[in-house]
Every structure is written in C-alpha cells, then in structure tokens.
Amino acid sequence: MSLVSQQWLFSLHHQSPSRTSISSGYTLSLYFSVICCRNQASAVQSQKSCRLQEKLIVCSCVGSKPTSQNGFRRRDLVLFSLSSSMSLVFPSPGSLAEEEDLKMASFVDETNAYSYMYPAELPSNKFLFKWVESRKPERYSSAAPLSPNARLRIVSERVDFIDNLIISVAIGPPNFELMKSKDKSTWRAKDVADSVLSDKSALRVTSSQRMDESSVLDAHTSEIDGEPYWYYEYLVRKSPTNIAQEPNLYRHYVASTAERDGYFYSLNASTLGKQWNKMGPFLEKTVASFRLLPPTENYVPPYKDPWRFW
C-alpha cells in the first residue's frame, strides 16, 4: 500500500463517528475504485511491455510471424534451431574460399627425378606469392649438407622472404640406428621422421640432441602407386629470421618422405608458427603433391660419382 493510501485511511479513521458513518461507504468505495484503476493501469502497462518485447523478438528473426502474443510458429522455431546448430557444425563459406581459389605451379627436377606443386596465387585476394629459387636443382654429391656428417643434403630450395615460407627437398641415407630394419615395408612414419630429423641440424651435436630440437606432432603412412610415402608434421624451436627474437618463436613444418635406391627423398615446407593458420593449408597441399618420378636419362642417383662437386 502506498504512502498516500495509508494517509487517506488514517484521516478516515480519526474523523468523527457521525461523519464517518455517513461517508464511510462512499469513501471506501472510492478508495477501492482508485486501487482497481491503478492495478488496471499497471496491467495495461505490463501488457504493452510484453507486446514490445514480443515485437523485438519477432523482428530479430527474419521471416518469422507470431501467431499469438507469446511467440513464433512451430515451423519457425524448428528452422531457427536448425540454422543455429548448422552454423556451429559447418564453417562459413569464406573460410574455405582461399583454399578453393588457390592457383598452384608445377616444379620438376629431372636431375633427381621428383616433382611437386607449390602455391602461386590467390586471385580472389589479388595475392601473389613471392618465390625465389634460392637453390637450383643439383646432384646429391654437390649439394649443400645440412649437418657436419654431410649425410642429408639440400638438392633444391625456394623461398618467399616476404611471407616467411620455405620449400626444400633434401636427400640422405636412412639412419639405421633408429630404423632397426632394412625392410621398408616395416618402417613406421615416426621412425622415418626421426631418422630424417636426426641428420638435419647444422650443429655439432649427437643425433639425439638434434632430435630434441624438433617435436613431431603427427606422422602417418600412405601408399601411392605401390610405394609408401611417409608424412609428418613437426616444430623446430628456433627461427632463421632476424626480425623475431622471442625465445618461444618456432617454425612449423610439414614433410613427405619417400625412398629410392637406398636414400630418403624428403620435401619440407615451413613457415613461422604464428603464420601457420594462414599459410599451413597451402603448404600441406604442396607436401601432398610430392612424387618421385620415373628416372630419365637426366637422372643422377645419389650414389653416383660421390667425389664430383659440380
């Protein structure tokens, strides 16, 4: 009861008996009429508020029409629920547009008999990759070694300095201290990855120390044209750039390895860790395209003329 109502009843109570008896019926009826009017006004205001909220809800869902004051048609509710759940299950169309729009170029090395595709352009974004061939294809005997023992050597490499991308192909013999068997049908992808990475560091450290520089995230095997290809993804806890000096910076790699003539042929593609979400899918396409080709007359086996440096 409001303060005004309380004061009204108080004054009524303290009036003279005769006056009270005469006007009490009228006064009380008037009082209750006022209370009823106020309650009706509150109800009307509440109803208007509910209608306003209903109108806002209806406007927030395009194409929905209320059939009562309380909500949507059953069909609209079902469609609204489906559209909400579908947006969580399926990515937005724009998230796949770049990969579908990607144009790739072909690279063939007849000296070492392999090929791969690499990203060249994203026409929808008017984006061009800025590749530079830092190492032209060369025979294994004259290629740059990746470690002091010169087992693993880069036979070709291309770099996009602007976007911090590197694609390289290296050749080297398996490390049978890690492989344990010479039957390649028994080789696991993780063992192949460890063998390649053990010979990759340029530091004068042991094979186990070189492996500690890298962390293999995933490894699996696929058979292509009857031959096994070993795929793996790994991180290297250092950056070859002078721009980023943070100690937690690393390079993110994907790689594919195949065996021929007793040597591993490995394609490695990498970028800075912070760019992986943007560039990683393009590099994965490159690694998936790596193939050993049937040798031609230009093919030079890794074991041929090991003394030759040109």
Image (spheres, grey):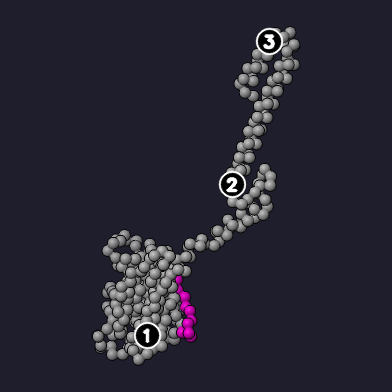
Q: Earlier in the sequence, mark 1 or mark 2?
A: 2
Nearest to the eye among marks 1 and 2: give it. Answer: 2
Instruction: Say which residue appears at 43% left-offset and 73% top-offset.
Output: 285
x then y, percent, for residue 118: 39, 74
Q: Earlier in the sequence, mark 2 or mark 3?
A: 3
Q: Look at label 3 and name its amino acid.
A: Gln
Q: Quadrant of the C terminus?
A: bottom left
- Which picture quadrant has residue 190? bottom left
**Which residue range is magenta in the image?**
213-227
Q: How crowded is the residue under tag 1: few (<14 C-alpha within 10 Å), some, or many (20+)?
A: some
Query: What residue sits right under mark 1 in the picture?
Result: 113
Query: What residue sits right under mark 2 in the picture?
Result: 59
x then y, percent, for residue 86: 57, 60
Instruction: Say which residue appears at 55% left-offset and 61% top-offset.
Output: 89
Q: Earlier in the sequence, mark 1 or mark 3?
A: 3
Q: CA distance from mark 1 to mark 2?
A: 64 Å
Q: Is residue 90 above or below residue 151?
A: above
Query: What residue sits right under mark 3 in the picture?
Result: 15
Mark 2 and mark 3 in contact? Answer it, CB < 8 Å.
no
Instruction: Say which residue appears at 33% left-offset and 71% top-offset.
Output: 131
x then y, percent, for residue 296: 37, 90
Nearest to the eye among marks 1 and 3: give it. Answer: 1
x then y, percent, for residue 297: 35, 91
> Helix, strand or loop at disc 3?
loop
Q: CA distance from mark 1 to mark 3?
A: 116 Å
Q: Is residue 277 above or below residue 32?
A: below
